[in-house]
């Protein structure tokens, strides 16, 4: 990042207010001023500080769209402080530490923020999947065929696969703790570029994808097996 402060004092003086943080994001996104992503017009007005309205075609662009701050209700100043805090911990940042360092009310919030920031910092957008991406999950490992004992010994794995017509493109996988909204949508955010179409099964946990910058397609499918290869038709057997 250009013009990013080098010391805590510089940081405090550069980001004194919410407006300072917004101005910084605007500058990062449009160094030469607003450009409409739909019609390329350069004329706009702001309906509020975070929202640009294209004067030519009426398209609205939120300054946080497609960023780690998308959809947040917390002040950007707080997010900026969290970024500063996370990057300045020499021995690694923990959710508990972030909660205390920022005075966040809930550990859960601190955990989600830490994971979002980590993903934003380690994963440049260029290696994210894009286009049409199918996401599914399955349990892997542990003893088979023992009724009632499977779940606690098995790991839940989420898989994302690019679809290119009938062919498959790149894939990403991750082990997640629980099939919660934060875990599953967090996985998608970590490996699928905003603006992509994400096709999932009917799980409620994926419902917020459309608020996170994705087009969400839900496919209700009959689950015949826990085999990941069965869940992604077209993937050859492992
Ligand atoms: Zn426009």
Image (cartoon, helix red, strand yellow):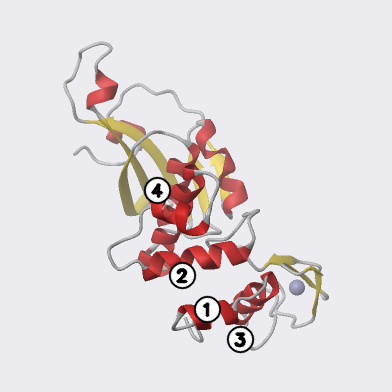
Q: Looking at the image, can residue 192 be seen?
A: no
Q: Is mark 4 within 8 Å of ligand 1?
A: no
- In contact (CB < 8 Å): disc 3 and disc 2: no
Which mark, by number, is residue 11? 1
Q: Which residue is mark 3?
A: 31
Task: Decide which of tag 3 and tag 4 comes sooner along the chain.
Answer: 3
State yes or no: discs 2 and 1 in contact (Cβ < 8 Å). yes
83 relative to 164, above or below: below
Q: Position of residue 88 (x, y in %)?
A: 38, 70
Quadrant in the rendering for residue 127: bottom left
In what quadrant does ligand 1 lie?
A: bottom right
Q: Earlier in the sequence, mark 4 or mark 1?
A: 1
User: Which label lies toward us, 3 or 4?
Assistant: 3
Residue sticking out furthest to the top: 147
Would you say 6 lies left or right of 58 here? left
Secondary structure under the numbered disc 1 in the rendered image? helix
Dot 4 crowding, Cα within 10 Å, few <14, some 14–19, many 20+ = few
Q: Are marks 4 and 1 in contact (CB under 8 Å)?
A: no
Query: Label 4, on which residue?
Result: 166
Distance Cα–Cα, label 4 vs label 1: 50 Å
Q: Which residue is mark 2?
A: 84
First reached walking from the N terminus: tag 2 or tag 1: 1
């Amino acid at each position: 990042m250009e013009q990013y402060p080098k010391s805590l004092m510089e940081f405090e003086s550069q980001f004194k207010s919410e407006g300072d943080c917004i101005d910084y994001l605007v500058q990062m996104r449009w160094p030469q001023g607003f450009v409409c992503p739909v019609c390329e017009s350069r004329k706009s007005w702001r309906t509020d500080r975070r929202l640009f309205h294209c004067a030519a075609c009426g398209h609205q662009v939120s300054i946080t769209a497609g960023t780690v701050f998308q959809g947040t209700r917390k002040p950007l100043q707080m997010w900026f402080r969290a970024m500063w805090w996370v990057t300045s911990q020499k021995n690694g940042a923990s959710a508990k530490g972030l909660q205390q360092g920022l005075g966040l009310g809930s550990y859960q919030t601190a955990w989600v923020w830490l994971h979002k920031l980590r993903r934003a910092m380690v994963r440049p957008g260029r290696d994210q999947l894009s286009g049409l991406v199918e996401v599914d999950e399955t349990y892997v490992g542990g003893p088979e065929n023992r009724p009632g004992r499977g779940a606690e010994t098995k790991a839940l794995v989420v898989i994302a696969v690019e679809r290119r017509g009938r062919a498959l493109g790149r894939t990403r996988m991750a082990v997640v703790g629980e099939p919660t909204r934060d875990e599953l949508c967090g996985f998608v955010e970590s490996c699928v570029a905003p603006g992509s179409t994400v096709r999932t099964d009917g799980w409620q946990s994926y419902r917020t994808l459309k608020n996170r910058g994705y087009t969400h397609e839900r496919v209700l499918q009959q689950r015949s097996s826990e085999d990941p290869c069965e869940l992604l038709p077209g993937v050859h057997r492992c």
